[in-house]
Amino acid sequence: MAKLKAVLLLDLVVVGLAAGGYFYVQSILEEMAVPVLKPAKFVFGNLTITPSRVEVNRPVMVKVYVANVGGEEGVCLISLVINGVVEENRTISLGGGNSTTVTFTVARGSAGTYTVKVGDLTGTFEVFELPEHQPVPAEFAVYGLTIIPDEVWVNETVRISFFIRNVGGESGSVTLAIAVRNATATLYAKNITVSLAAGGVTTESVTFTPNSTGTYYVSVERVGGAYLSMTGTFHVVQTGYHTLTVSASTTNVEFKLNGTVKKVPFSDLLPVGKYLIEMPPTSLDGRAVFLYWSDGYRSPTREVNLQSRMSLFAYYSGGSSCPSLFVWNGTSYVYVAEVSNHGWLGYMNYVTGDPEWPIVYWRNNPWDYLKLDKSLLALVNGTYFDMVLSQRWNEIFYLDTVYLVVVDHPADVEVYSTGVEQYLSPDYMGKIYTVSLNPLKPVSAYNEKGEDVLHRILYRDGVFTPGVNGLHSPSWNNITWNRLTIDLGNLSGAQQIKLIVTGKVDWGSPDDYTAWIEKFFAEDVPPGTQITPPPYMEILGGNGEWIMVPWERQFPLPQDVNPRTWVVDLTGLFPPDVDRYVVRISNFWNVTFDYIGVDVTPQKPIKVWEAYPTATLYQEFPSPSRAYGNFTRYGDVTPLVLSFDDEFVIGRQGDAVRLLFNLGDIPPPAEGMERSFFLFVACWFKDEAGNWGYGFNFTVEPLPFKDMSGFPYPLDKESYPYELHREYLTTYNTRVVKPPEGEGNS
């Protein structure tokens, strides 16, 4: 057994700001003054229209973000204008510094293109007629579930409202069951029957007065007939108190609440009243710089008046990790996701027992298959999409290729891709699957504690399964696995079996991860011990034994701290003699699930195009990063992103790549087809901590490459193919950043 000694780069933890970063922060501080309460001022943003193309009489949802950027509470009139005519007025009240999203639902009975305007924001949606030879029976949609307020005190009344629309071509009726429950019992139940003519719409609402504190769950479900459901939650808290939540785009931040030091993410029940919140200009390690609050407020110090549940989010230059994707929605760049999380370099695999090379590292996988919300995408000049990959965290990124995947599919199905993991078969990685709009529900679901969690995965409602973080295991051989056992029912005769999964990963705090890694440096560890084991999936055999799924078909680790949806193809994995189709999914990391559905429909024909961008590298903001080496020069970098070839756009914190995808050569969808978009990205990245002192410093070199065994790799056995790419290296990587004083000689 090998006894490993940590060579921790402690100076990286206490790193100060470089000179350029200091003056940048100083200039911000000079502009910031403790704010005086100003009159209410309302701003609109992020107008989304879903779907953008719809049949006659089908509902269209219009959402708009509204923020009060003043200091005092105020009332705002929001007008929805369609083709120059006021469709609906809403009046809302918001405290200073608060924000909300307002949702309108409209429908049109005649074909055409409709222009939507809310404030100074505009957008369009298209309505088309079904062919006359297609009869459309009565069909119902329920939508727009609102629960107001979403946090109340005991004996305060909550109003639950929703819309019902007959989106079919004939009159009909539907019966809906409305229920309110807490963790143990159903407290309110009511059935309502609604009759509507074709295209008719009505609003239904009920009230409920809770008599005890806790979390309450609301459901609206169809009684009989095709599946139809909505869910939501509200909270009852101690009288005189409300929840204040303060979060940030980096966890390495402490702030002051009325002079008391707190750490993000912070959430607590507090007495109603005014609070002074003071965010620091930089993170604790000086690597991330305060940018702005999510409602646009620019000062890190602000006073808020807590009179209802309030959630505040501060953006720092750090992000969470990996490059951050922003897309142009017609009025602004909006955040979408962190990209290529699996491309992190320095991810430890197992201990070898060899003092010369004590740890084997994962090669990892630089790919990401990100489905884009098409309601956020706005064509510029009717021809191209505008996106930005921004490096906000203190990392070095190596962007190899990026392209837009345009998928036309039948309107009666949805499309998703696979997740990403390094061991997945090339036959499955990046494959686009069609799935039913009404997938089957699992029969049962239990976690590692034997708790029934089925109700948490039946709907995409933001209610996740409870997770257990493996980082909290007390020793290397006593890992607490996050485990989910799901009975899918009897799927005998199914041509295909696919899970549609919505989940996310919580990587835990850096302190937890550091403590876990240090165990392997401080103890005698058997050779072959995995430090952070990968997820795995098992199938229940006919005689009750668990059968490990082949590694090339294994369950992936989610890409993001934000929920993603992906497909897991189970076709052909179950033994032929089983009558119960049961899977068990185990995760070392803290993985939680919002939704898991089961699709048994065969793959439908789809049409796929790939659109490659023009790409420009530029500096988005100055950075105090200590990263050094030969980075890619600013300017046009289009040739570098057109193929997966080990020729990278190499950047550091503060750098960004603007991507313009021209769709002018792609024809519109055929009749009966809808269009979806995916962004496929191959990008490696590494951070300042490296791999805890082994193998590399915070420099551009050594470069990753497709055929490496892992990272870092043994330099005496393998190398980046310099001779093959010498022209690329000398032409593009000419932006030399010198090492900070005292570094660069190791």
Image (cartoon, rainbow, N blue to C red):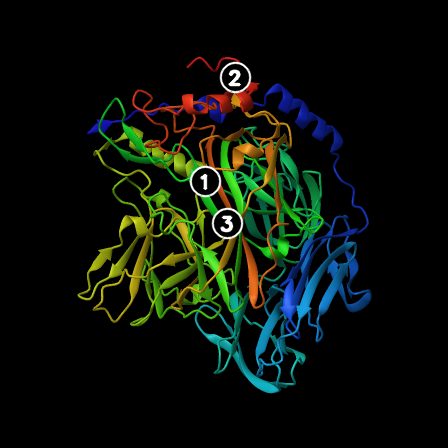
Residue name at image x 48 percent, y 60 percent: 606
**Which image quadrant: the C terminus?**
top left
Q: Amino acid at mark 3?
A: Leu
Location of residue 238 in the rendering, given as x and y in whole percent from the top left corner: 57, 61
Q: How many marks?
A: 3
Looking at the image, can residue 626 be seen? no
Image disc number at residue 739 = 2
What is the secondary structure assignment of the residue under circle 3? strand
Q: Nearer the viewer, residue 156 or 151?
A: 151
Q: Earlier in the sequence, mark 1 or mark 2?
A: 1
Marks 2 and 3, how far apart at CA: 35 Å
Q: Earlier in the sequence, mark 2 or mark 3?
A: 3
Q: Nearer the viewer, residue 474 or 633?
A: 633
Q: Amino acid at mark 1?
A: Ser
Image disc number at residue 509 = 1
Looking at the image, can residue 618 be seen? yes
Marks 1 and 2, how far apart at CA: 28 Å
